[in-house]
Amino acid sequence: MYYSGKRRGEDGIAAVIDFLLSNARLVLGVGGAAVLGIATLAVKRLIERAGRPPDEKPDKKMTDSWEELSLVSASPKLLHKGIEGVVMKQIAAATKKAELSQPIPLPSPESQRCDADQPQRRKRMDLCVMTFAERLQQYYRTRVCLSAKEVSVAQQRALDIATEIQAFLHSKHPDMPLGDMTLAGSLLDDLQVVKADHACLIVPLQLESSLWTPIAGEDTFLGHPQYCMVRRENLEYFPRGRSYWDRHLLGGYLSSRLVSEQLGKTVMESMNWPSLTGTLECEVRPVLGSPELKLEIEGLTQSSYDSGERFYITMLPTVRLGEMKLTAQREITGSFDYVWYQSLYTSETARLAALDKADSGVRRKCLKTLKAVCRNCPSLRKLNGSHLSNVILHMSEKETDWSESSFADRFQQAITELIGYLETGILPSYFKPNVNLFQGFTEDDIDEMGFMLYCAVTEPEILLI
């Protein structure tokens, strides 16, 4: 190491660089060591170029520049998810410093005539400079919020489809005890961002409270607080067949799979979708092969039809017994045929709305902005509304200033809080602390999201691209 340097004074730097690179894998992992090695090598070459004599050939300088660009393009997949700008900015700054060692050309007569316009041009450029808080407000207005017309059209189409489905079910199975279908989800709660593209249709099952009992998730053999069961009671006094839903029993419990399969066969496979398409003036078709009961709608408006945008409606069979509201979501519960999912979306949304109403806060605004950022950034798309809602709810327990003037500060604080949860791999649910909302993430997922957010701590503008 002591004799590998080309010039005097480089020995100590080389020793430090070699030591860092040799131990980086132990500290940062494979991806982090690769990024550190690429950045270190690029900076080292820039330092060497800055010390070259000014009469060196420009072709050699151009070759070095393309070598540095190739180093950045050869970085791991994390850099290709939006981090290139951070590395390129550092390289550009170092390149600018290196260019200062070159001879300064004499100004031409034309440039001297334009010197008088420089102050006015500089003032105009200063007006274009925006702080991060101003850019965040602009991002919220232009890329987060939906227009009232777009939301109204989507809600009306979803309600029209719900009316047609309920009428068909009543004619096909008049003895099936169902309540009135209603819309739910972020579209109805003014929490949908970027574009109106999905809604939930609640299909309420009417169960006799004397014959059915909900079993909390903590009391089942699964032990998951959100995986509940519905047990049939009093079989000795009210034998099987007294309730319509007895035909969906599985081992003495109401099966979410059997209920979903019946609704799927009745609605998805039996309805006359071409006729419904002509009635509603938009294409409606079922999404087959999915564990969800999902409909795809194309052509809500003429502009969405021309752009090929789709709108999706997910049907959720729902059981309400006492204070428990359970839904059949097989995409979440998996192969457990008799398990019902207890969603906390309604409780989380109501809590955020109540807190904002109490102090005129911006919690919901911050949530919508974070949702749009995660949706637009490929590295962060696995962070959904539930993750972000719980982060903000946890922040509300220790942070009191949620005024409009602190919007940017709370946004950046949420990024920092997310990094902390990702480092531990645990994000506890606000209403059920035993539930880890990061349970389904792999180590690669956590590393990828953590790296992107860590870069956003020093360069938050990369999230608004």
Image (cartoon, grey):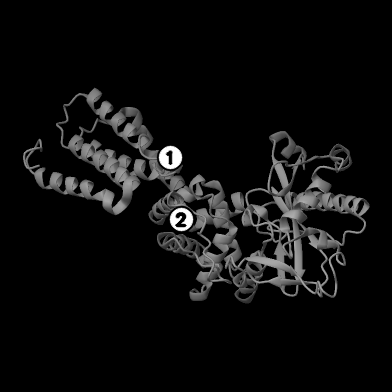
Q: Between 123 and 287, which is closer to the camera in this rendering?
A: 287
N-terminal label among 1 and 2:
1
Q: Mark 1 points at which residue?
A: 80
* Residue 13 higher or lower than 221, as above or below: above
Q: How far across and how far down the image is residue 136, in percent?
A: 52, 55
Image quarter (top left, top right, bottom left or bottom right) of the N terminus: top left
* Circle 2 crowding by C-alpha within 10 Å: few under 14, some 14–19, many from 20: few
The amino acid type, in three-letter code, at marker 2 is Thr
In the rendered view, does 193 fall on the left or right side of 322?
left
* Circle 1 crowding by C-alpha within 10 Å: few under 14, some 14–19, many from 20: some
In the rendered view, does 273 fall on the left or right side of 429?
right
Q: Do the residues labelled 1 and 2 touch (CB within 8 Å)?
A: no
Q: Between 274 and 248, which is closer to the camera in this rendering?
A: 248
Picture residue at 24% right of the left edge, 30% below the top: 105
Query: Residue 131: which numbered mark, if any?
Result: 2
For residue 67, what is the image quadrant? top left
Q: How far across and how far down the image is residue 228, in percent?
A: 66, 66
Q: Is mark 1 on a helix, strand or loop?
A: helix
For residue 332, what is the image quadrant? bottom right
In the rendered view, does 71 fall on the left or right side of 252?
left
Q: Between 346 and 190, which is closer to the camera in this rendering?
A: 346
For residue 300, what is the image quadrant? top right
Q: How far across and how far down the image is residue 24, in percent?
A: 26, 49
* Residue 83 higher or lower than 238, as above or below: above
* Residue 381 higher or lower than 48, as above or below: below
Q: Between 119 and 347, which is closer to the camera in this rendering?
A: 347
The amino acid type, in three-letter code, at marker 1 is His
